[in-house]
Image: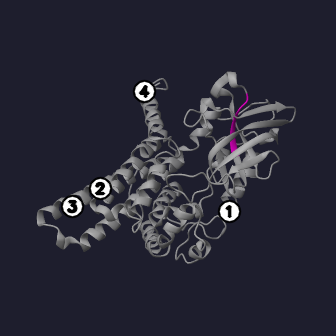
Amino acid sequence: MSVGLDISNELKAYRESLKEWGREAVRPYAREADETHALPGLAATILDSAPVPLDRYDVPTDGLPPVPDGDIVRRNVWYEAVAYCDIWLSEALSRGVGHLVVDAVGTAEQKERWLRPVLEGGRITSLGLSEPDAGSDTSRIATTATREGDVWRINGSKMYCSYGAIADYVVVFASTDRERGRSAILPFIVEKDTPGLTVLRHNEDKLGLRCWTTSQLAFDDLIVPADHQLGWTGEAATSLTANGLDAALASLNHNRPNVSAQSVGLAQAALDLTADLLRDDRASFSPNRWRLVETELEQMNAALHRSRTMNLHAQALADTGVHNRLEASAAKAYGPPTSERVVRRCMQLLGPDGSSNELLLEKWYRDVKILDIFEGTGQIMRLLISRQLMGRRAAS
């Protein structure tokens, strides 16, 4: 299928206005967010100063502008532009990802109850998947859910739950029968303040994305009603629509090109800053050396353009309703590691200044490294790609 990859002039204009504002209003607070592991103290005031809509979850009237591009493509461009400003802006504007699972496998009643309020604004969601001994391998999930009449009793713990400490609800993946492996893992809605839910750590200490709230949660004899099991229709104790765990995890497909777009935004910010600083110092370069520098800058821009194209292609397919698991996985597999190499080379070109706290490059390098891990590591993405090309048993 042929899908056009050029975005509209309206979307380009919005992107450039957002980036221009972000350079002046958002970046000066990037170091504060990194060092305090929290949003800047003036975050609300900064957001209020934006000349274009930011799609703030706390301001329902602040939706993205109408453009002829698809909604998912528009959102991808937004993710890159927001990250270009600095990654703390992404944290300030995000709604989480738990509701994506509700959208994928929830019943009509569950979507009305837990999805619509998120889309209409004002609610944040979290995803409880990773555990101390179970990251990419979901079959090792140790959190359990035991059916007791009309309720489920959940016990276990989760880590690196984005927005877990502040979310209105967490989608928790738990095993209903350890002997059945992956086929017995189901998603449950756990609303905030549910007795038995404990925040063990508000924000994990991380290499990068330090201001992003990634929490460690514990579930101690936590009770949820039967209808909090996503996909439950009342016909069976563990019924789940749309192929169970695989469908629930596949709901993250649409977000993987967005994570890649965030990495491209950070790398483009580093590359633009590096190019400006090198041009200011051009007189210190010999003509031959400067030509080599210009060639490197062009090659890095081309690499980021390739990643951007892959991101847009995957999301354009999603906008047209075409299955895009292969393309989404390829975008995530290529974008973050490519962006990491670009930022690292920018640091090298600037010499000692490149790794100093005087510039943001070392921070962006740490941030982009985490994006290579979040939403599926590169190894997992390559595994998904091989299975899409050669069948499920490939690379097993």
In percent of width and height, residue 376 lies at: 51, 42
The residue carrying pointer 1 sits among few (fewer than 14), some (14 to 19) or many (20 or more) residues within 10 Å by Cα, namely: some
Closer to us: 234 or 118: 118
Q: Nearer the viewer, mark 2 or mark 4?
A: 2
Residue ID for mark 2: 300
The earlier-in-sequence mark between 2 and 1 is 1
The residue carrying pointer 4 sits among few (fewer than 14), some (14 to 19) or many (20 or more) residues within 10 Å by Cα, namely: few
The residue shown at (53%, 47%) is: 254
The residue shown at (56%, 68%) is: 54
Check residue 20 for magenta coloring: no
Main SS, magenta residues:
strand
Give me the C-alpha separation between circle 2 and circle 1.
38 Å
The answer to whether residue 110 shows anywhere in this view is: yes
The answer to whether residue 271 shows anywhere in this view is: no
Residue ID for mark 4: 390
The reply to whether discs 3 and 1 touch (Cβ–Cβ < 8 Å) is: no
The residue carrying pointer 3 sits among few (fewer than 14), some (14 to 19) or many (20 or more) residues within 10 Å by Cα, namely: some
Q: Is residue 346 toward the left or the right of residue 111 in the image? A: left
The reply to whether discs 1 and 4 touch (Cβ–Cβ < 8 Å) is: no
Q: Amino acid at mark 4?
A: Met
Q: Amino acid at mark 3?
A: Val
Residue ID for mark 1: 121
The earlier-in-sequence mark between 3 and 2 is 3
In percent of width and height, residue 217 lies at: 69, 46
Q: Is residue 219 toward the left or the right of residue 79 in the image? A: right
Residue ID for mark 3: 293
The earlier-in-sequence mark between 2 and 4 is 2
Kindly indicate the quadrant of the structure image that contains residue 107: top right
Give me the C-alpha separation between circle 3 and circle 1.
46 Å
The earlier-in-sequence mark between 1 and 4 is 1
Range of magenta residues: 171-176
In percent of width and height, residue 322 lies at: 50, 43
